[in-house]
Image (tube, rainbow, N blue to C red):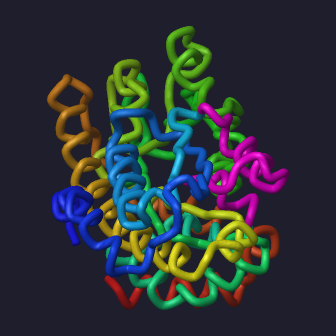
Amino acid sequence: MDRRTFLTATCAAAASTSVLGFTRPAHAETVLRIGTLAPNGSSWMRVFNAWANSLSQQTNGQLKLQFYAGGAAGDERDAVRKMRAGQLDGAALTTSGLGQIVRSALVLQAPGVCHSYARIDAVRTKLAGEFAKQFEAAGFSLLGWGDAGQGRVFANRAVLTPDDLKQTRIWAWRDDPTWAAVLSAAGVNGVALGLPEVYPALRTNRIDAFPGTSIAAVSFQWYTKATHVTKEPRGIVIGATVLRKEKVDALAPELKSALLETGKKAHEALAKAIRKDDEKAFEAIVGKGVKPVSLAEHEKRWEGVLAQARKSLVGKLYSAELLAQVEKIAASAG
Protein backbone atom coordinates (compact mmCIF):
# COMPACT_ATOMS: atom_id res chain seq x y z
CA MET A 1 0.00 0.00 0.00
CA ASP A 2 1.49 3.36 -1.01
CA ARG A 3 1.10 6.52 1.00
CA ARG A 4 -1.81 7.90 -1.05
CA THR A 5 -3.72 4.65 -0.73
CA PHE A 6 -3.04 4.53 3.01
CA LEU A 7 -4.17 8.08 3.55
CA THR A 8 -7.30 7.52 1.47
CA ALA A 9 -8.12 4.33 3.32
CA THR A 10 -8.76 6.26 6.52
CA CYS A 11 -11.99 7.59 5.04
CA ALA A 12 -13.34 4.09 4.45
CA ALA A 13 -12.26 2.56 7.75
CA ALA A 14 -15.23 3.78 9.74
CA ALA A 15 -17.68 1.90 7.55
CA SER A 16 -16.12 -1.42 8.57
CA THR A 17 -16.36 -1.06 12.33
CA SER A 18 -19.70 -2.80 12.69
CA VAL A 19 -18.50 -5.97 10.99
CA LEU A 20 -15.18 -6.02 12.83
CA GLY A 21 -16.91 -6.44 16.18
CA PHE A 22 -16.05 -3.13 17.85
CA THR A 23 -19.26 -2.73 19.80
CA ARG A 24 -18.11 -1.36 23.14
CA PRO A 25 -19.29 2.10 24.21
CA ALA A 26 -17.42 4.93 22.52
CA HIS A 27 -16.23 6.29 25.86
CA ALA A 28 -14.27 3.09 26.66
CA GLU A 29 -11.10 4.23 24.95
CA THR A 30 -7.37 3.58 25.32
CA VAL A 31 -4.87 6.22 24.24
CA LEU A 32 -1.31 5.21 23.40
CA ARG A 33 1.13 8.08 23.95
CA ILE A 34 4.00 8.08 21.43
CA GLY A 35 6.98 10.41 21.35
CA THR A 36 8.93 11.38 18.22
CA LEU A 37 11.51 13.92 17.16
CA ALA A 38 9.76 14.28 13.80
CA PRO A 39 8.38 17.82 13.50
CA ASN A 40 4.77 18.61 12.68
CA GLY A 41 4.24 18.88 8.92
CA SER A 42 7.06 16.42 8.15
CA SER A 43 6.66 13.26 6.07
CA TRP A 44 6.76 11.18 9.25
CA MET A 45 3.98 13.11 10.94
CA ARG A 46 1.73 13.08 7.89
CA VAL A 47 1.82 9.29 7.90
CA PHE A 48 1.63 9.02 11.70
CA ASN A 49 -1.44 11.26 11.77
CA ALA A 50 -3.08 9.19 9.04
CA TRP A 51 -2.28 6.05 11.02
CA ALA A 52 -3.88 7.55 14.14
CA ASN A 53 -7.01 8.48 12.20
CA SER A 54 -7.28 5.06 10.59
CA LEU A 55 -6.86 3.21 13.88
CA SER A 56 -9.38 5.38 15.70
CA GLN A 57 -11.98 4.92 12.98
CA GLN A 58 -11.37 1.19 12.62
CA THR A 59 -11.83 0.66 16.37
CA ASN A 60 -14.78 3.03 16.72
CA GLY A 61 -12.67 5.34 18.88
CA GLN A 62 -11.70 2.63 21.37
CA LEU A 63 -7.98 2.78 20.55
CA LYS A 64 -6.22 6.04 19.75
CA LEU A 65 -2.67 7.20 19.12
CA GLN A 66 -1.45 10.49 20.52
CA PHE A 67 1.85 11.63 19.03
CA TYR A 68 4.13 14.13 20.77
CA ALA A 69 5.93 15.58 17.75
CA GLY A 70 9.05 17.70 17.43
CA GLY A 71 10.72 16.36 20.57
CA ALA A 72 7.90 17.52 22.86
CA ALA A 73 8.60 14.40 24.93
CA GLY A 74 12.34 15.13 24.93
CA ASP A 75 15.31 13.69 23.05
CA GLU A 76 15.39 9.98 22.28
CA ARG A 77 17.19 9.20 25.53
CA ASP A 78 14.34 10.96 27.34
CA ALA A 79 11.74 9.03 25.34
CA VAL A 80 13.30 5.66 26.23
CA ARG A 81 13.51 6.65 29.90
CA LYS A 82 9.88 7.79 29.91
CA MET A 83 8.72 4.57 28.29
CA ARG A 84 10.47 2.54 30.93
CA ALA A 85 8.91 4.72 33.62
CA GLY A 86 5.45 4.35 32.08
CA GLN A 87 5.21 8.04 31.18
CA LEU A 88 5.14 7.20 27.47
CA ASP A 89 3.68 4.12 25.81
CA GLY A 90 5.84 4.20 22.75
CA ALA A 91 8.23 6.15 20.54
CA ALA A 92 9.35 6.47 16.95
CA LEU A 93 13.11 6.20 17.35
CA THR A 94 16.25 6.39 15.25
CA THR A 95 19.75 5.07 15.91
CA SER A 96 20.17 6.79 19.25
CA GLY A 97 17.03 5.47 20.91
CA LEU A 98 16.96 2.00 19.37
CA GLY A 99 20.50 1.35 20.54
CA GLN A 100 19.51 2.09 24.11
CA ILE A 101 16.90 -0.66 23.97
CA VAL A 102 18.65 -3.34 21.91
CA ARG A 103 22.33 -2.59 21.40
CA SER A 104 22.84 -5.29 18.78
CA ALA A 105 20.17 -3.69 16.54
CA LEU A 106 22.84 -1.12 15.71
CA VAL A 107 24.50 -3.74 13.54
CA LEU A 108 22.09 -2.35 10.94
CA GLN A 109 24.06 0.88 11.27
CA ALA A 110 27.47 -0.82 11.17
CA PRO A 111 29.59 1.68 9.19
CA GLY A 112 29.91 0.88 5.50
CA VAL A 113 27.67 -2.22 5.41
CA CYS A 114 24.01 -1.34 4.73
CA HIS A 115 24.71 1.65 2.53
CA SER A 116 21.72 1.12 0.21
CA TYR A 117 18.01 0.47 0.63
CA ALA A 118 18.40 -2.91 -1.07
CA ARG A 119 20.92 -3.95 1.55
CA ILE A 120 19.03 -2.70 4.59
CA ASP A 121 15.81 -4.30 3.34
CA ALA A 122 17.52 -7.64 2.74
CA VAL A 123 19.09 -7.73 6.20
CA ARG A 124 15.95 -6.71 8.07
CA THR A 125 13.80 -9.18 6.14
CA LYS A 126 16.20 -12.04 6.83
CA LEU A 127 16.64 -11.19 10.51
CA ALA A 128 13.13 -9.86 11.22
CA GLY A 129 12.24 -12.61 13.68
CA GLU A 130 15.49 -12.27 15.59
CA PHE A 131 15.16 -8.51 16.01
CA ALA A 132 11.52 -8.86 17.12
CA LYS A 133 12.57 -11.37 19.79
CA GLN A 134 15.33 -9.10 21.07
CA PHE A 135 12.99 -6.14 21.43
CA GLU A 136 10.39 -8.32 23.15
CA ALA A 137 13.04 -9.59 25.58
CA ALA A 138 13.78 -5.95 26.38
CA GLY A 139 10.09 -5.31 27.07
CA PHE A 140 9.06 -3.69 23.79
CA SER A 141 6.99 -4.59 20.74
CA LEU A 142 8.50 -3.61 17.40
CA LEU A 143 5.62 -2.31 15.28
CA GLY A 144 7.58 -1.49 12.17
CA TRP A 145 10.69 0.03 10.66
CA GLY A 146 10.67 3.57 9.32
CA ASP A 147 14.03 4.87 8.15
CA ALA A 148 15.11 8.49 8.22
CA GLY A 149 16.77 8.54 4.79
CA GLN A 150 20.27 8.31 3.34
CA GLY A 151 23.10 9.57 5.51
CA ARG A 152 25.34 12.32 4.17
CA VAL A 153 27.75 14.92 5.55
CA PHE A 154 26.79 18.60 5.35
CA ALA A 155 29.44 21.24 5.99
CA ASN A 156 30.62 24.77 5.32
CA ARG A 157 33.49 23.40 3.25
CA ALA A 158 34.04 20.51 0.85
CA VAL A 159 34.54 17.27 2.76
CA LEU A 160 36.20 14.91 0.28
CA THR A 161 38.44 12.79 2.48
CA PRO A 162 38.47 11.61 6.09
CA ASP A 163 41.22 14.15 6.72
CA ASP A 164 38.88 16.94 5.64
CA LEU A 165 36.66 16.06 8.60
CA LYS A 166 39.48 17.13 10.89
CA GLN A 167 39.10 20.68 9.62
CA THR A 168 35.47 20.84 10.75
CA ARG A 169 33.61 21.24 14.00
CA ILE A 170 31.22 18.40 13.33
CA TRP A 171 28.21 17.33 15.36
CA ALA A 172 28.35 14.02 17.20
CA TRP A 173 24.93 12.95 18.45
CA ARG A 174 25.07 11.81 22.03
CA ASP A 175 24.22 8.10 22.35
CA ASP A 176 25.10 7.34 18.70
CA PRO A 177 28.10 5.01 19.07
CA THR A 178 28.30 4.12 15.38
CA TRP A 179 28.97 7.69 14.23
CA ALA A 180 31.31 8.19 17.18
CA ALA A 181 33.27 5.17 15.96
CA VAL A 182 33.56 6.65 12.47
CA LEU A 183 34.87 9.93 13.87
CA SER A 184 37.32 8.09 16.09
CA ALA A 185 38.61 6.00 13.18
CA ALA A 186 39.11 9.21 11.19
CA GLY A 187 40.90 10.86 14.12
CA VAL A 188 38.19 13.49 14.54
CA ASN A 189 36.86 14.98 17.76
CA GLY A 190 33.16 15.66 17.31
CA VAL A 191 31.06 18.16 19.25
CA ALA A 192 28.62 16.16 21.40
CA LEU A 193 25.10 17.62 21.26
CA GLY A 194 21.51 16.50 21.59
CA LEU A 195 19.38 16.87 18.46
CA PRO A 196 17.49 19.98 19.69
CA GLU A 197 20.86 21.70 20.18
CA VAL A 198 22.00 21.30 16.57
CA TYR A 199 20.30 24.29 14.95
CA PRO A 200 21.32 26.76 17.69
CA ALA A 201 24.88 25.42 17.47
CA LEU A 202 24.91 25.95 13.70
CA ARG A 203 23.65 29.52 14.13
CA THR A 204 26.39 30.37 16.63
CA ASN A 205 29.11 28.50 14.70
CA ARG A 206 29.70 26.14 17.59
CA ILE A 207 29.52 23.51 14.85
CA ASP A 208 29.98 23.98 11.11
CA ALA A 209 29.28 20.45 9.90
CA PHE A 210 26.82 17.69 10.65
CA PRO A 211 25.88 14.18 9.52
CA GLY A 212 22.28 13.69 8.52
CA THR A 213 19.73 12.89 5.89
CA SER A 214 18.44 15.40 3.39
CA ILE A 215 14.87 15.11 4.64
CA ALA A 216 15.99 15.79 8.21
CA ALA A 217 18.16 18.70 7.08
CA VAL A 218 15.11 20.27 5.43
CA SER A 219 12.66 19.41 8.21
CA PHE A 220 14.87 21.02 10.86
CA GLN A 221 16.23 23.74 8.50
CA TRP A 222 19.82 22.68 9.15
CA TYR A 223 20.69 22.82 5.46
CA THR A 224 20.42 26.63 5.55
CA LYS A 225 23.67 26.64 7.50
CA ALA A 226 25.64 24.47 5.06
CA THR A 227 27.40 25.23 1.78
CA HIS A 228 28.40 21.68 0.76
CA VAL A 229 26.94 18.17 0.99
CA THR A 230 28.41 14.80 0.08
CA LYS A 231 26.87 13.42 -3.10
CA GLU A 232 27.18 9.74 -2.25
CA PRO A 233 25.27 8.52 0.82
CA ARG A 234 27.35 6.58 3.32
CA GLY A 235 24.51 4.61 4.88
CA ILE A 236 20.84 4.46 5.77
CA VAL A 237 19.76 6.09 9.03
CA ILE A 238 17.58 3.44 10.65
CA GLY A 239 14.37 4.09 12.51
CA ALA A 240 11.51 2.12 14.06
CA THR A 241 8.38 2.52 16.14
CA VAL A 242 8.29 0.60 19.41
CA LEU A 243 5.63 0.27 22.10
CA ARG A 244 5.85 -1.05 25.65
CA LYS A 245 5.09 -4.76 25.33
CA GLU A 246 2.96 -4.84 28.46
CA LYS A 247 0.75 -2.09 27.03
CA VAL A 248 0.24 -3.96 23.76
CA ASP A 249 -0.38 -7.29 25.51
CA ALA A 250 -3.03 -5.68 27.74
CA LEU A 251 -5.18 -4.73 24.74
CA ALA A 252 -8.27 -6.72 23.87
CA PRO A 253 -7.53 -9.13 20.99
CA GLU A 254 -9.52 -7.17 18.41
CA LEU A 255 -7.81 -3.90 19.41
CA LYS A 256 -4.35 -5.46 19.31
CA SER A 257 -5.11 -6.91 15.88
CA ALA A 258 -6.22 -3.51 14.59
CA LEU A 259 -3.12 -1.86 16.02
CA LEU A 260 -0.76 -4.33 14.37
CA GLU A 261 -2.65 -4.30 11.06
CA THR A 262 -2.79 -0.52 10.73
CA GLY A 263 0.75 -0.21 12.05
CA LYS A 264 2.07 -2.56 9.36
CA LYS A 265 0.33 -0.57 6.63
CA ALA A 266 1.50 2.73 8.08
CA HIS A 267 5.13 1.68 8.16
CA GLU A 268 4.97 0.35 4.61
CA ALA A 269 3.59 3.72 3.55
CA LEU A 270 6.19 5.50 5.66
CA ALA A 271 9.10 3.66 4.04
CA LYS A 272 7.92 4.65 0.57
CA ALA A 273 7.23 8.23 1.59
CA ILE A 274 10.56 8.79 3.33
CA ARG A 275 12.63 7.32 0.52
CA LYS A 276 10.86 9.41 -2.09
CA ASP A 277 10.84 12.59 -0.02
CA ASP A 278 14.49 12.21 1.03
CA GLU A 279 15.54 12.17 -2.62
CA LYS A 280 13.35 15.20 -3.32
CA ALA A 281 14.86 16.96 -0.30
CA PHE A 282 18.38 16.34 -1.62
CA GLU A 283 17.42 17.80 -5.00
CA ALA A 284 15.80 20.79 -3.28
CA ILE A 285 18.89 21.42 -1.16
CA VAL A 286 21.13 21.37 -4.22
CA GLY A 287 18.64 23.63 -5.97
CA LYS A 288 19.03 26.12 -3.10
CA GLY A 289 22.76 26.38 -3.82
CA VAL A 290 24.29 23.79 -1.50
CA LYS A 291 27.08 22.24 -3.57
CA PRO A 292 27.23 18.43 -3.87
CA VAL A 293 30.75 16.99 -3.69
CA SER A 294 31.73 13.51 -4.85
CA LEU A 295 33.73 11.10 -2.70
CA ALA A 296 34.35 8.67 -5.56
CA GLU A 297 38.05 9.45 -6.00
CA HIS A 298 38.69 8.79 -2.31
CA GLU A 299 36.49 5.70 -1.91
CA LYS A 300 39.29 3.43 -0.71
CA ARG A 301 40.24 5.84 2.08
CA TRP A 302 36.65 6.02 3.28
CA GLU A 303 36.28 2.24 3.09
CA GLY A 304 39.33 1.88 5.32
CA VAL A 305 37.92 4.24 7.93
CA LEU A 306 34.49 2.59 7.86
CA ALA A 307 35.96 -0.91 8.14
CA GLN A 308 38.05 0.13 11.13
CA ALA A 309 35.01 1.76 12.73
CA ARG A 310 32.70 -1.25 12.44
CA LYS A 311 35.37 -3.64 13.68
CA SER A 312 35.93 -1.42 16.73
CA LEU A 313 32.29 -1.95 17.71
CA VAL A 314 32.54 -5.75 17.82
CA GLY A 315 32.01 -6.88 21.39
CA LYS A 316 30.57 -3.48 22.31
CA LEU A 317 27.40 -3.35 20.21
CA TYR A 318 27.30 -6.64 18.33
CA SER A 319 29.16 -9.90 18.05
CA ALA A 320 31.64 -10.75 15.32
CA GLU A 321 29.27 -13.54 14.23
CA LEU A 322 26.29 -11.19 13.86
CA LEU A 323 28.37 -8.65 11.94
CA ALA A 324 29.62 -11.36 9.58
CA GLN A 325 26.04 -12.56 9.03
CA VAL A 326 24.84 -9.06 8.24
CA GLU A 327 27.78 -8.41 5.92
CA LYS A 328 27.02 -11.62 4.02
CA ILE A 329 23.31 -10.83 3.62
CA ALA A 330 24.05 -7.23 2.60
CA ALA A 331 26.67 -8.27 0.03
CA SER A 332 24.23 -10.71 -1.56
CA ALA A 333 21.77 -7.83 -2.10
CA GLY A 334 24.31 -5.92 -4.16
Residue at left offset 78%, top offset 80%: 137
Residue at left offset 34%, top offset 85%: 333
Residue at left offset 44%, top offset 86%: 125
Point out the stretch of residues depicted in magenta.
72-101
Give residue 55's quadrant in the image.
bottom left
Residue closer to the observer: 256 or 89: 256
Instruction: Judge whether residue 216 can be spotted in this image.
Output: yes
Residue closer to the observer: 160 or 111: 111
Query: Any magenta on residue 251?
Result: no
Instruction: Judge whether residue 163 can be spotted in this image.
Output: no
Above/below status of 134 relative to 99: below
Residue at left offset 51%, top offset 79%: 254
Q: Which quadrant: the C terminus?
A: bottom left
Count the marks: how many? 0
Q: Position of residue 291 (x, y in %)?
A: 24, 30
Q: Position of residue 106 (x, y in %)?
A: 64, 67
Residue closer to the observer: 42 or 121: 42
Give residue 165's quadrant in the image.
top right
Is 226 left or right of 209, judged from the image as shown?
Answer: left
Q: Position of residue 226 (x, y in %)?
A: 38, 23
